[in-house]
Image (spheres, helix red, strand yellow):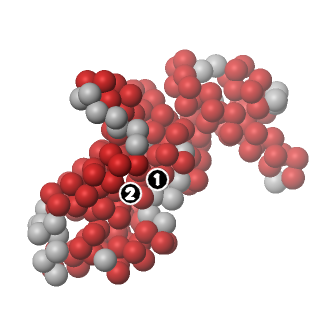
């Protein structure tokens, strides 16, 4: 692909992430995305086929940018399996803080329905398998409670996602300041205690 075409494709994708994160797939228009990216909407259709195709590409793009299990996180987890829950949860919270489009696009994808998430089928397969090895070892070594891997990972991902998608409302309903580093530390420590054997 020519350099100019690659640049156009990148601009479309970045504009799509921004607009879809704000409005979702049904709320966004192709005209809006093209205008934000400074491109002709025919290019958008040429590269992505449809608005749905572009939404899926935007979702995958954000997943590729987001490193849920960084090498540093995996190395730290291997060295300290007794702190696996805290290490992973801190990592997940850090991802959401650094990439607000991530949880927003996930929210919209879930609201839009199954057709929008098929592109994610293989998105984390390799990382999940690497993490499963550490998880299984932690259970064998007796430092982690015996739970199903999917339940464990689901819980940590759900807590980190829910924290960012609902912390404004929960700060009011729980009457607790959920935006500070102190709360995050307490949350990580408490959950580490829940799963620690």
159 vs 2, left or right, is left
Of residues 136 and 8, the one nearer the viewer is: 136
Q: Which residue is depicted at the point 43% across and 27% down? A: 112
Instruction: Give the Cα distance between marks 1 and 2.
Output: 6 Å
Give percent across and percent down for residue 31.
72, 19
Location of the N terminus (image quadrant): bottom right
**Circle 1 Cα neighbour tier, 10 Å, few/some/many (<14 / 14–19 / ≥20):** some
Instruction: Inspect this view and state whether residue 80 appears.
Output: yes
| Tag 1–tag 2 contact (CB < 8 Å) | yes
Of residues 29 and 173, the one nearer the viewer is: 173
Q: Which residue is depicted at the point 45% across and 39% down? A: 103
Circle 2 sits in a helix, a strand or a loop, which is it? helix
Q: In which quarter of the image is residue 109?
A: top left
Location of the C terminus (image quadrant): bottom left
Residue 123 image label = none
Circle 1 sits in a helix, a strand or a loop, which is it? helix
Q: Please tell me whether residue 67 is drawn above or below residue 40 in the rendered image.
A: below
Q: Please tell me whether residue 109 is drawn above or below residue 134 in the rendered image.
A: above
Q: In which quarter of the image is residue 46?
A: top right
Give percent across and percent down for residue 30.
68, 22
150 vs 101, left or right, is left
Instruction: Inspect this view and state whether residue 133 appears.
Output: no
Q: Please tell me whether residue 133 is drawn above or below residue 88 in the rendered image.
A: below
Q: Name the residue under label 2.
A: 90
Q: Name the residue under label 1.
A: 94
Q: Which residue is depicted at the point 49% across and 46% down? A: 97
Give percent across and percent down for residue 77.
35, 73
Q: Which residue is depicted at the point 69% across and 33% down? A: 15
Of residues 185 and 8, the one nearer the viewer is: 185
């Amino acid at each position: 692909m020519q350099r100019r075409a690659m640049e156009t494709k990148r601009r479309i994708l970045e504009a799509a992430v921004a607009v879809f994160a704000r409005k979702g797939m049904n709320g966004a228009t192709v005209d809006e995305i093209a205008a934000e990216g400074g491109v002709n909407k025919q290019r958008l259709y040429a590269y992505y086929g449809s608005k749905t195709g572009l939404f899926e590409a935007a979702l995958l793009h954000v997943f590729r940018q987001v490193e849920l299990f960084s090498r540093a996180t995996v190395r730290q987890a291997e060295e300290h399996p007794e702190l696996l829950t805290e290490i992973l949860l801190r990592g997940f919270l850090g991802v959401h803080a650094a990439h607000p489009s991530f949880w927003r696009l996930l929210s919209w994808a879930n609201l839009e329905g199954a057709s929008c998430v098929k592109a994610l089928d293989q998105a984390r397969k390799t990382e999940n398998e690497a993490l499963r090895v550490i998880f299984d070892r932690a259970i064998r070594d007796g430092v982690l409670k015996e739970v199903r891997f999917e339940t464990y990972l689901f819980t940590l991902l759900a807590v980190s996602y829910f924290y960012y998608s609902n912390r404004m409302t929960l700060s009011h309903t729980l009457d607790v300041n959920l935006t500070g580093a102190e709360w995050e530390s307490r949350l990580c420590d408490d959950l580490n205690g829940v799963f620690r054997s």
